[in-house]
Amino acid sequence: MDFTVEVEDIVAMIVSIICGGAIGFEREYKNKSAGFRTIILISLGSTIFTIVSRHGVGTDDRISANIITGIGFIGAGVIFKDKISVRGLTTAAVIWTSAAIGMTTGIGYHALALCLTVITLGVLLMVTKVERLIASLQKEQLLSVTFAEPEFSQIERLENTLNTKGLLLERMDITKENNHLMVVFKVSGKKKYLVKMSETLATVPEIISFS
């Protein structure tokens, strides 16, 4: 089968690199696991697969569907879960969106792809400012504390101490391991009080670790 490189395809790949590079730069600047090169390659790869699908014999949506499935696996690889939080969801969503933008350039909708890139960057930048504003007012976070001794009285003392420092605590989980009590609290309060909380916890002799 004859395959001739078309100008339209070259333009699609260039636009894909520009769009992926713009989003990847923001991720690299924030030191995320999927950075500049990764996002460019995801966007470009999606564009190439879409171009191949468009030129193929008996073209259908199977390649596009497999792009979505494959990107899902890549996105899952950047998500990390520990005992009290899940990280990487935003980066996974950015990977998903970058692939969609790459597919958009692959079918020739370059103006739409550039518009979607601007919208994506706007969401990433503006949401950060909104999150900072919310954090300055009131914030909730999970606190995991490990006590040296399996005594419940020390839990109550810690709660009383933090309650007097502008914070509200709610017990979420209590476990015992190697003769140590591990307690997960939901803590709410203004950001300045949450920052000082770490200093307070570091001075409590009954606590051997916290996160």
Image: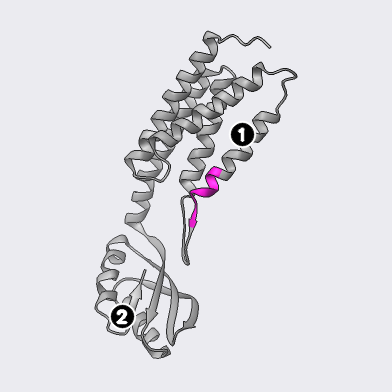
Q: Are marks 1 and 2 in contact (CB under 8 Å)?
A: no
Q: Residue furthest right?
A: 58
Residue 202, located in which quarter of the rendered image?
bottom left
Cα distance between the residues tagged 1 and 2: 53 Å
**Which color mode does the image show?**
one colour
**Magenta stretch contains residue 207:** no
Q: Residue at x 59, y 9 (%)?
A: 4
Height in image: 165 above or below 77? Answer: below
Q: Which residue is mark 1?
A: 67
Residue 39, located in which quarter of the rendered image?
top left
Q: Earlier in the sequence, mark 1 or mark 2?
A: 1
Split into 4 quadrants, where in the image is the N terminus?
A: top right
Q: Which residue is mark 2?
A: 161
Split into 4 quadrants, where in the image is the C terminus?
A: bottom left
- How many dots with numbers? 2
- Label of residue 99 in the image: none
Q: Where in the figure is residue 117, as x and y percent of width and height?
A: 46, 28
Q: Where in the figure is residue 156, as x and y percent of width and height?
A: 39, 85
Q: Residue at x 46, y 65 (%)?
A: 84
Q: Residue at x 30, y 77 (%)?
A: 164
In the image, which is nearer the foreground, mark 1 or mark 2?
1
Q: Where in the figure is residue 2, as x and y percent of width and height?
A: 65, 9
Foreground of the two, 34 or 156 = 34
- The region drawn magenta spans 74-80
Q: Name the element at disc 2.
A: helix
Local packing at callout 2 (Cα closer than 10 Å; few below 14, some 14-19, many 20+) is some
Q: Where in the figure is residue 178, as x and y percent of width and height?
A: 45, 85
Q: Amino acid at mark 2?
A: Thr
Residue 138, located in which quarter of the rendered image?
bottom left
Foreground of the two, 6 or 93 = 6
Height in image: 125 above or below 164? Answer: above
Local packing at callout 1 (Cα closer than 10 Å; few below 14, some 14-19, many 20+) is many
